[in-house]
Amino acid sequence: MERRLFLQAAGGFALSASAAPSGRALRGIFPIAQTPFTAAGALDLPTLVKQLEFIHKGGVHGFVWPQLASEWSTLSEAERREGAEALTAAGKKLKPAIVIGVQGLNAGTAVRYAQHAAKIGADAVIALPPPGKPSDAEVLGYYKQVGAATELPLFVQAVGNMSVDLLLRMWKEVPTLRLIKDEAGEPLMRMGRLRANSRDELQVFTGGHGRTMIDEMYRGSAGTMPASSFADLYAVAWDQWQAGRKNEALDAFSKALLFITEVQVYGIPSLKYILELRGVFPNHAIRGDSAAVGSILASKGVLDEKGKEVLAQLVRFAKPYFRA
């Protein structure tokens, strides 16, 4: 806490929870990007950048890569570095804030990724906790090391049994920790405590495909991190809500809900297939076993031909409402 106050007083590092050092806002719709692969299974860097450009055209506020929906655990360190470099280079000319995922199997690896992200000009970093079932003390120690590695704003992706009390303790002891993507427990029930007990300095984002986004905005959320496939629909809803046009926001979000119900069944393959249908991805290839990867974000798993037909119909229906 003392270092946080010192940095605020010194003025050398902007600790505003709502902005990156670059001045880009850290609020709104920050989709977790999907990772494109070539037919041969290699990381497709041009298509990864094309996805960022697609997000920019859709008026979306941020871009996050690589996290769970990005199949981050299948990527090599070289691929993660190359992808981050390509995105930050392209992002300098675009509006979305670039948030780089830096989690690793241990704190030392995560620190290397965080330092690399700062070096190449990322706007912020985000990290999942260490794998397995770490104790609260181990989680705190991990994030202290990641947070000390750079002065970039740090998002914590809260999962598993990370309690509100633990997150508040982390916020007090890690000066750069200013933002939470809360997927541990029910975020609607936790958001008020996180905001009130941090004097609103801790900004709360959510995940879960943003399925309760309207309720979240009523409660003062800082944003949500859905998938990138139809992020422009979320962005319309967010922008209309912030402008006080709540009925228009509800109308826009109703279109997103059509997709949310489907991708919760089919997972990552369906997210990529929507990007393929929208002309962003050349294919919807994933790494590893389709059912295993698909089930990361799905209750059922494999995307079949009937599922593809439904998604194609939804894309045709929603086309007038898309921005990109």
Image (cartoon, rainbow, N blue to C red):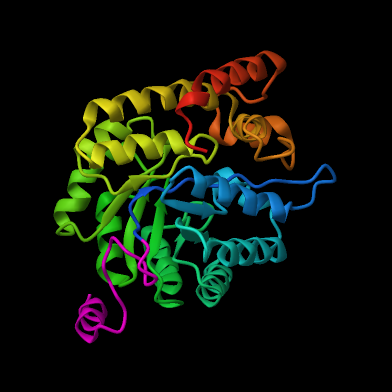
Q: Does the magenta stretch include residue 18?
A: yes
Q: Can residue 102 be seen in this view?
A: no
Indicate whether 237 appears above or below 115.
above
The quarter holding residue 285 reads: top right
Residue 76 appears left or right of 151:
right
Residue drawn 44% across the image and 53% down it: 62
Indicate whether 168 appears above or below 277.
below
Residue 282 appears left or right of 250:
right
Report the magenta stretch's main SS.
Answer: loop
Q: Nearer the viewer, residue 186 or 258?
A: 258
- How many numbered marks appear? 0
In the image, farthest residue toward the right: 40
Q: Does the magenta stretch include residue 124?
A: no
Residue drawn 26% across the image and 67% down it: 16
The quarter holding residue 110 reads: bottom right
Instruction: Write the start and end of the magenta stretch as one range.
Output: 1-24
Q: Can residue 246 be seen in this view?
A: yes
Q: Nearer the viewer, residue 53 or 14?
A: 53
Q: Position of residue 88 (x, y in %)?
A: 56, 65
Residue drawn 26% across the image and 45% down it: 221
In the image, farthest residue toward the front: 320
Q: Position of residue 120 (x, y in %)?
A: 56, 73
Residue 246 appears left or right of 295:
left
